[in-house]
Amino acid sequence: MRPIRVFCFVAAMCVSALAFGQEPARQSPKMGSKEWTELEKTLWDVDQQWLCSAGATPYHKDYKECVEFRSQFWTNQFFEISIKGKVQTKAEMVAAQRVAHPSKGVGPHPDDFKLMAVYGNFALATDHTFLQNESTDGKVSGTETRVLRMFAKEDGKWRPAGAALVPVIQ
């Protein structure tokens, strides 16, 4: 009987020691609050940095410079689901973008950003993004999309964690 009591005591001590080292649950901001509005502005700014290849963003960079920035800015677990349903990891996206040579002005053009949900250090937002592209024959066209954007807070900074694009069909 004594070994069972000792085992239970040691197990209880281990569990309580683990609980002591845990960070307390953080309260997510309430929709419409000042904190919510400030976080929405912060994440819109992160979105603008993320889409640095578009000519319309305040963080515009040369395409190749933007690709290298993204390779550092995106979280390691970053992934994207394209408008055709293809899932790509961060490594796959960076590799594909490094070999691309888009024309000037071709790229994402976001607007209508809205914070939708916050779960501690993870947030979901949506935006409308016009994807301007160029076909092999040189014609420029575009696709309107609604994008679910995912953000993770790492080391005190919000970073892009993923996206899912849905074409807008009219």
Image: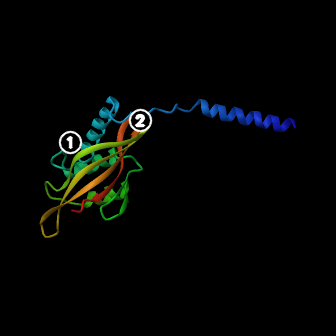
Tag 2, which secondary structure? loop
The quarter in which the C terminus is drawn is: bottom left
Please give the name of the residue rendered at 84% of the width and 37% of the height, measured from the top-left corner: 3
Residue furthest to the bottom? 137
Please give the name of the residue rendered at 56% of the width and 33% of the height, measured from the top-left corner: 22
Which circle's residue, 1 or 2, is located before the other in the chain?
1
Residue 59 got which mark? 1
Q: Position of residue 28 (x, y in %)?
A: 42, 34
Label 2: how many residues lie within 10 Å, few (<14), some (14-19) or many (20+)?
Answer: few
Please give the name of the residue rendered at 20% of the width and 42% of the height, measured from the top-left corner: 59
Please give the name of the residue rendered at 24% of the width and 62% of the height, measured from the top-left corner: 169
Q: Position of residue 13 (x, y in %)?
A: 70, 32
Foreground residue, 78 or 65? 78
Tag 1, which secondary structure? loop
Determine which quarter of the picture holds residue 46: top left
| Amino acid type shown at disc 1 | Tyr
113 left or right of 118? left
Residue beneath label 2, please? Answer: 155
4 left or right of 154? right
Q: Position of residue 62 (x, y in %)?
A: 18, 49
